[in-house]
Amino acid sequence: MSRRPLEATVKIGVFLKQVPDTETKIRPAGDGSGIESGDVKWIVSPYDEFAVEAGLQLKEKSGGEVVVVSLGPARTLDAARTALAMGADRAVILDDEGFQGSDPLGTSRALAAVARKEGFDIIFCGRQAIDEDNNQVPQIVAGLLDWPHASWVNSFESEGEMATVKRPIGGGKLEVVKVRLPAVFSCTKGLNEPRYASLPGIMKAKSKPVARYTPADLELDGQVGASAAVVQLTSYQMPQARPSGRMLEGEVGDQVKELVRLLRQEAKVL
């Protein structure tokens, strides 16, 4: 894809994922193939909200349009509608059965193909989805597009063909990176304060355009979906309950000896 400066015709892509609400009690399905979804409340992954806001702010500065893209089942449209209500212009939903079961590589192939088809000039996404915490898709998409990528972005400024971003690198320090556009940016907390959808925005979202592509539309037959996945999830299980703590009694010297014995014989960490 050709490089060009951000102009009034800039096309801003925002990738988002629908995930379970953090307040939802998650239970694995009986066969371990996934989670029980009947009582789950679904939301936009919180880091993706920073990406939506970044796209909207760039549009307000440079013009153009914001297109949100999401892969998932039919209910994924609800997440896209949230972004449309915030101010995004239109959405692309990849809910065809052929996409279902994609691993991070398959998902990235689909999203990169949409980016090519739509002609995005810049892509924002969350640093990672909060359900599986893979933190893989932004980097893979950038690689497939042969674009630069900056992760954990908490400050963004653009000027012409360049963007200047800041990202935390630990110890309270920030790394300043200059990136030539087009590029992929994964966003984290501190970048902005995502706006709330207004009532008029919610009403307008219902009539905003929503496109759908199939694997064939994106020339991805055989490259996405469960059959093409190189990573297979065998089962979902709840963590085993931790045993209750044990109080050691007696003199300090005796407690130390007993602790060492327990660490060696039961915990087997010595």
Image: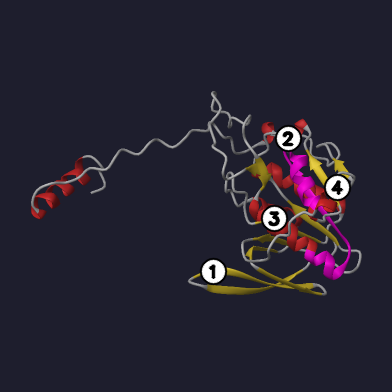
Which residue matches tag 3?
Answer: 49
The residue under label 3 is which amino acid type? Glu
Which label lies toward us, 2 or 3?
Answer: 3
Q: Earlier in the sequence, mark 2 or mark 1?
A: 2
Q: Secondary structure at mark 1?
A: strand
As measured in the structure, the alpha-carbon distance from the residue carrying label 1 to the one carrying label 3 is: 22 Å
Residue 194 marker: none
Q: Which residue is mark 1?
A: 169
Measured Cα–Cα span from mark 4 to mark 1:
41 Å
Please give the residue where the numbered disc 4 appears in the rendered image: 203
Which of pointers 4 and 1 indicates the residue nearer the eye?
4
- Please tell me which of labels 1 and 3 falls first in the chain: 3
Magenta-highlighted residues: 57-85
Callout 3 environment at 10 Å: few (<14), some (14 to 19), or many (20+)? many
Question: Residue 186, percent across and down?
Answer: 67, 59
Separation of residues labelled 2 and 3 (CA atoms) = 20 Å
* 47 or 121, nearer to the observer: 47
Residue beneath the point at 35% across and 39% down: 242
Residue found at the very far front of the displayed protein: 199
Per the image, label 2 sits on a secondary structure element best described as loop
Please tell me whether mark 2 or mark 1 is closer to you in this view. Answer: 2
Label 2 belongs to which residue? 73
**Amino acid residing under circle 2:** Pro
Going by the numbered disc 4, the residue's amino acid type is: Met
Q: Residue 89: give x, y in percent of width and height.
A: 86, 54
Query: CB atoms at circles 4 and 2 under 8 Å apart?
Result: no
Circle 1: residue type: Ile
